[in-house]
Image (cartoon, grey):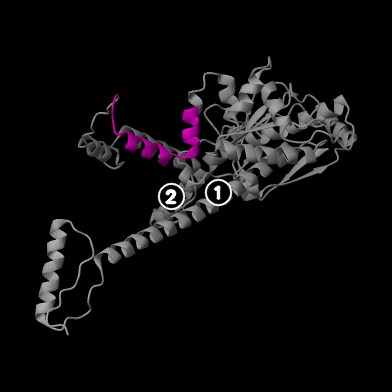
C-alpha cells in the first residue's frame, strides 16, 4: 500500500537546501493521511517509459527565471522613464535575488554592530552594570531553595539526573521511566536500547496478534516505503536543524531507527526555554518484523516532566498496539502531538485550581488573623458622649500600644450613669 498525505498548498514548506521533489510541512496538524493499494504492474510499465536523457537543473532554471524577471523590470522602468513618468510609479515586481541580497546585508550589519541595529546601545547599557561576585562557598540557603522551586520541573529533574553515575540510567529516566525501573533494567547485560524495549513492552498487553500475517518481504517493503516518505517530509540528517529527522543509518533503505520532531506540540511559557519534543523510533534490532511488530517508541524533551512523559508513552504504547500490522509512524506523530497538548492542558487547569485554592486559604488566614487582632483590641466605640471620653480613650490606647500590651483595652467613660 502507498501512504498518501492531504494538505493545503499553503502548508507546503520548501527550502533551498532540499533536493528536487522534497517538501515538508509548516503544520502537521493540517495534514490528513490515507492509504491506497499500489498497482505494481502499472508502476513497472511507467518505469519502462522513463527517459534517462532528460536531466533538468531546476536550480539553474530558477535563476534563469529570476534573471528574466529582473530584465523585464528594467525594460518597464526604462519605458516609463522615456514617457516622462516617474520610474517608481510603475508596478513593483518581486525580485528574489535583490530580496536575498538585502536580507544578507541586513544580517551582516546587525551582527557587525552599527548605529541602527541596537546592538551597540545594548552593549553600552551592559557596561554600566556592576554585578556582584558569586559566593561559591556560602550564600543564603533560603534564597537558593526559593530559586530552585521557581525552576520548571523538567530543569530540576535534569539536575537530579546529572547526579546519577550511570549514563544508561540517565538515558532511561530522561524518557520517563523511574529510577528504580531504570536501575533494574540496567542490571542485566542488555544494551540501553534493549533495556528501553523491555521497559516499553511492560506498558501494554502483548497478548493480541496482528489481524494479518505479513511476510518478511512485505514487512521490508512497507518499511522502505515509510522511510522514503519520512525523508521526503523531514529531509535528511542535519545536526544544525533540530526540526529535521535524525536517522541512525540514512543510507540503508531498510533501517528505520529515527528521531522525529513533534512540530505540532508547543510547550507553554511556564516551561521556559524547553528543548524540542522528539519521538524516537527503534525497530532495527528490537522490532525487526515491524509493522508486524510493535515499534519501540520513546519521548524526550518538550519541557515535559518524567511523569508526563511516562503518561504519554503509555498512551502511545496502547495506540501502537491497536495499529499493529500497518505502518503507523505518521499516525503516532499526530497522536503524540495531540496527547502532549492534552496532558499539558490538564496540568494547566490543575495548577490554576491549586493557585485558586491557595489564594482562598491565604485570604481566609488573613481574615482570621484580623478578627483575632480585633478581639484582642476590644470594641471601638462608634461615638463618645463627651470630648473628655474621647480623649481618655485615645490616651489609654496610646499608653498600651507604647508598652507593648495588646490585651483588651477597656473604655474609660467618665460621667457614665
Crowd class of label 2 (few under 14; some 14 to 19; many from 20; radius 10 Å): some
SS of the residue under disc 2: helix
> Where's residue 101, x and y in %?
43, 38
Labels 2 and 1 touching (C-beta < 8 A): no
102 relative to 47 in the view: left or right: left
Magenta stretch in the rendered image? 137-160
Is residue 85 among what the camera can see? no
Decide which of 255, 270 is in the foreground and name it. 270
Q: Which residue is mark 2?
A: 78
Name the quadrant containing residue 183. Answer: top right
> Where's residue 355, x and y in %?
46, 54
- Which sits earlier in the primary sequence, circle 2 or circle 1? 2
SS of the residue under disc 1: helix
Q: Which numbered marker is on residue 410?
A: none
Q: Residue at x 90, y 35 (%)?
A: 212
Q: Which residue is mark 1?
A: 347
Q: Quadrant of the C terminus?
A: bottom left
Amino acid at each position: 500500500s502507498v501512504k498518501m498525505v492531504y494538505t493545503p498548498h499553503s502548508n507546503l514548506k520548501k527550502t533551498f537546501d532540499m533536493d528536487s521533489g522534497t517538501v515538508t510541512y509548516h503544520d502537521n496538524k493540517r495534514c490528513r493521511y490515507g492509504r491506497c493499494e499500489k498497482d505494481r504492474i502499472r508502476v513497472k510499465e511507467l518505469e519502462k517509459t522513463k527517459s534517462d536523457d532528460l536531466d533538468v537543473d531546476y536550480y539553474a532554471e530558477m535563476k534563469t527565471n529570476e534573471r528574466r524577471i529582473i530584465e523585464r523590470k528594467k525594460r518597464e522602468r526604462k519605458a516609463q522613464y522615456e514617457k516622462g513618468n516617474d520610474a517608481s510609479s510603475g508596478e513593483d515586481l518581486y525580485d528574489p535575488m535583490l530580496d536575498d541580497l538585502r536580507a544578507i546585508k541586513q544580517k551582516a550589519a546587525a551582527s557587525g554592530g552599527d548605529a541602527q541595529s541596537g546592538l551597540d546601545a545594548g552593549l553600552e547599557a551592559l557596561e554600566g552594570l556592576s554585578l556582584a561576585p558569586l559566593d561559591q562557598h556560602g550564600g543564603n540557603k533560603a534564597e537558593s531553595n526559593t530559586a530552585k522551586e521557581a525552576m520548571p520541573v523538567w530543569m530540576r529533574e535534569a539536575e537530579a539526573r546529572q547526579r546519577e553515575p550511570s549514563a544508561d540510567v540517565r538515558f532511561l529516566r530522561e524518557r520517563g521511566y523511574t529510577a528504580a525501573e531504570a536501575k533494574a533494567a540496567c542490571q542485566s547485560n542488555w544494551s540501553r536500547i534493549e533495556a528501553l524495549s523491555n521497559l516499553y513492552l511492560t506498558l501494554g498487553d502483548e497478548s493480541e496478534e496482528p489481524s494479518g500475517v505479513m511476510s518478511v518481504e512485505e514487512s521490508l517493503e512497507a518499511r522502505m516505503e515509510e522511510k522514503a516518505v519520512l525523508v521526503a517530509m523531514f529531509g535528511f540528517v542535519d545536526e544544525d536543524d533540530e526540526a529535521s529527522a535524525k536517522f541512525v543509518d540514512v543510507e540503508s533503505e531498510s533501517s528505520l531507527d529515527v528521531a522525529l520532531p513533534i512540530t505540532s506540540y508547543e510547550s507553554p511559557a511556564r516551561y521556559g526555554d524547553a528543548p524540542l519534543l522528539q519521538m524516537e523510533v527503534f525497530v532495527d534490532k528490537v522490532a525487526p518484523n515491524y509493522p508486524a511488530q510493535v515499534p519501540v517508541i520513546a519521548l524526550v524533551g518538550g519541557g515535559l516532566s518524567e511523569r508526563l512523559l511516562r503518561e504519554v508513552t503509555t498512551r502511545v504504547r496502547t495506540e501502537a498496539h491497536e495499529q499493529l500490522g500497518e505502518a503507523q509512524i505518521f499516525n503516532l506523530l499526530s497522536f503524540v502531538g495531540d496527547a502532549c497538548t492534552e496532558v499539558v492542558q490538564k496540568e494547566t487547569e490543575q495548577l490554576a485550581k491549586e493557585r485558586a485554592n491557595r489564594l482562598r486559604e491565604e485570604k481566609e488566614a488573613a481574615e482570621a488573623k484580623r478578627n483575632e487582632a480585633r478581639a484582642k483590641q476590644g470594641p471601638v466605640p462608634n461615638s463618645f458622649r463627651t470630648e473628655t471620653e474621647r480623649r481618655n480613650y485615645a490616651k489609654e490606647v496610646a499608653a498600651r500600644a507604647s508598652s507593648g500590651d495588646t490585651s483588651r483595652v477597656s473604655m474609660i467613660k467618665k460621667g457614665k450613669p
